[in-house]
Image (cartoon, helix red, strand yellow):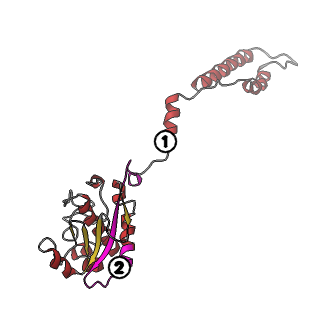
Amino acid sequence: MKQGILLVSVIVGALVLGMVSISGAKPQPGDTKGAMGELRLLPEVLSEVKAPTINQPQWLIDKQAAAARPVQSQSATQPASTKTFTYSIQAWGKVAVDKGEFGRQAAATLSDNRGWLRAGARFSEVASGGDFILVISEASELARRYAPGCSAEYSCRVGPYVIINQDRWVGATPSWNNAGGNLRDYRHMVINHEIGHWLGHGHAGCSSPGQPAPVMLQQSIDLQGCDFNPWPLQNELWVGR
């Protein structure tokens, strides 16, 4: 492009110099080839000037092509391989929660792209048995069956049993509610947290106040300065089974 501009400048400069030299001569009567004649020819001369074709360098073509490609968000990235785990649902004790609705909400959590699916864990409900049992339990049943490992206050995981405390399912906890969390997100969190234990995860701490809490933080008890978060963080995306 710069070569084309330089070429036009040279031509225009030559024409201007020619007109200056012509304008120094005395015009003769009837002379149509003086300075004014040269000015009338200038548009015609310029129309014949063609700028050379300048091809874009390959590095610029590559850069433009890369910028045009869609960017895939990390949250949508799927693992190279997956494992499928089966589970069934049970209810323990006097349960007022609708078992079918509990199962539907749990399945929605387990199939959500923000959850353990990102770590390569898929879940399929079966009528009975399975790799683990997902339980909605009356609060007192946890302490009766598995004390002192489990209490009537919180949810728990023991062996193949992933046990959700009915009281927590219905009302979450003061820690969560005081931080402004909603009940549906609490249900996502408690399912992901207890199944995270079954997948091989231990408890985690808050890395920095104001940051999203690890899903394996005991958010039901204390957020430790973190913000409530129902989903596994990037550094939690692994499966120990």
Query: Is residue 81 in view from this perspective?
Result: yes
- Does the magenta run of residues contain 69? no
Q: Quadrant of residue 170?
A: bottom left
Left or right: 35 as drawn, with respect to 68: right
Q: Position of residue 167 (x, y in %)?
A: 25, 80
Residue 37: where, in percent of width, then height? Answer: 80, 22
Tell me the kind of residue under disc 2: Lys
Q: Secondary structure at mark 2?
A: helix
The earlier-in-sequence mark between 1 and 2 is 1
Left or right relative to 218: residue 3: right
User: Residue reaching furthest right?
Assistant: 30
Mark linked to residue 67 = 1
Residue picked out by circle 2? 99
Give percent across and percent down for residue 220: 22, 71
- Residue pushed farthest left? 148
Residue 71 as seen in the image, left or right of residue 207: right
Frontmost residue, 89 versus 106: 89
Quarter of the figure that contains the N terminus? top right
Q: Are marks 1 and 2 in contact (CB under 8 Å)?
A: no
Q: Is residue 195 above or below residue 183?
A: above
Picture layout, residue 108 above or below residue 44: below
Q: Residue at x 79, y 19 (%)?
A: 34
Can I make out residue 210 in this image?
Answer: no
Q: How crowded is the residue under tag 1: few (<14 C-alpha within 10 Å), some, or many (20+)?
A: few
- In this orientation, which residue lies closer to the viewer: 239 or 93? 93
- Which residue occupies the foreground of this view, 7 or 206? 206
Query: What segment carries the magenta color?
Result: 74-103
Q: Disc 1 marks which amino acid?
A: Ala
The residue shown at (32%, 65%) is 130
Q: CA distance from mark 1 to mark 2?
A: 50 Å
Q: Quadrant of residue 125?
A: bottom left
Front-lying residue, 144 or 4: 144
